[in-house]
Amino acid sequence: MTVLVFLDPAYDDGRIADASVPQLMATDLGATRGDGIFESLLALNGEARKVQAHLDRLGSSALALNLALPSQDAWRRAIATALDAYAATTAGPADAELAVKLLVTRGVEGADAPTAWVQVAPVPARTQRQRREGLSVLLLDRGYDSTVAQRAPWLLMGAKSLSYAVNMAAVRYAQAHGADDVIFTSSDGKVLEGPTSTVLLARVRDGVKTLLTPQLESGILPGTSQSALFSVAKAAGWDLGYGPLVPADLFDADGVWLISSIRLLAPVNSLAGRQIAPAAGLTAELTELVAKIS
Ligand SMILES: Cc1ncc(COP(=O)(O)O)c(C=O)c1O
């Protein structure tokens, strides 16, 4: 079951559209060039989480691509319309967790008007399973060095652009080699991010727990989940740190996780074929903190 709501200036709260029939023009630049941006957020029991952080990042991505965006209010109304429409059509515990996508393309060629819509669908069972059971992860070279984002802003490294074919190819490569997911490294050997997630590691020294993540300047997407988790973890007494991190830091860590808005916190069980320190206690503690994020 998928619900679509288009942000259409003729409809204050968005226009509900039938997801079972075509809704996009074949000449939409999102389809022909992957020219657009998106956000994925989680809705729990009808309530979308971290909406402001996602709308703010959508705004930063739009700036990077020089795309015109509907207002944040229009997005909020369209999200509410989509969640209401979903709730009206189904019921049951399987629908308690929904993936809400916000999508914007540069629009139909020559029209100079973006196409924008909200999509709501259940969180896939496999995503929920990975959250519970953890991941086997490969380290893959992204092919850029860790200073490329500053030198080459046209690569849109810190934007959540629709051009995710490379990210999806990396996940398929991992699956073809018996793994579930990927941590990208830079050509100068720094730990970057997953294709759809932020990397976290924990160090526990003399009773002091530190949560670390790669530094943003290395050309990664600023994760809304990592940022929100850092806030609640700080309040709970954790120390925080930002890279640069190298693969040896992952192997030496007391726990490694991938975190993102839909899958939430997923423990890394093995990395590049080597077991990672099991961290059931830290995973339980961090999962509890993640549950506090709203
Ligand atoms: C490349 C990349 N990095 C990190 C993340 C995690 O971001 P967030 O926590 O905001 O979902 C995502 C999310 O999809 C992503 O695509």
Image (cartoon, helix red, strand yellow):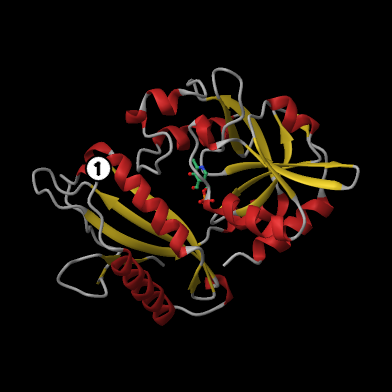
The residue sitting at 40% across, 82% down in the picture is 88
Which quadrant holds the N terminus?
Answer: bottom left
Residue 288 versus residue 183: which sits nearer the camera?
288
Picture quadrant where residue 194 is located: top right
Q: Secondary structure at mark 1?
A: loop
Does residue 178 appear in this view? no
Residue 3: % across, % down: 35, 68
Q: Residue at x 61, y 64 (%)?
A: 293
Closer-to-camera residue (95/205): 205
Q: Residue at x 72, y 63 (%)?
A: 288
Relative height, residue 275 to residue 75 (above, below): above
Residue 167, visible in the rendered structure: yes
- Mark 1, Cα crowd under 10 Å, few <14 / some 14-19 / many 20+, is few
Task: Give residue 90's quadrant in the image.
Answer: bottom left
Q: Quadrant of the C terminus?
A: bottom right
Q: Name the kind of residue labelled 1 in the image.
A: Asn
Pick the front one: 232 or 136: 232
Total labels drawn: 1
Residue 236 is situated, as x and y percent measured from the top left of the image, at 75, 60
Specify whether 180 is left or right of 6: right
Q: Is residue 236 above or below residue 30?
A: below
Task: Give the residue at mark 1.
Answer: 66
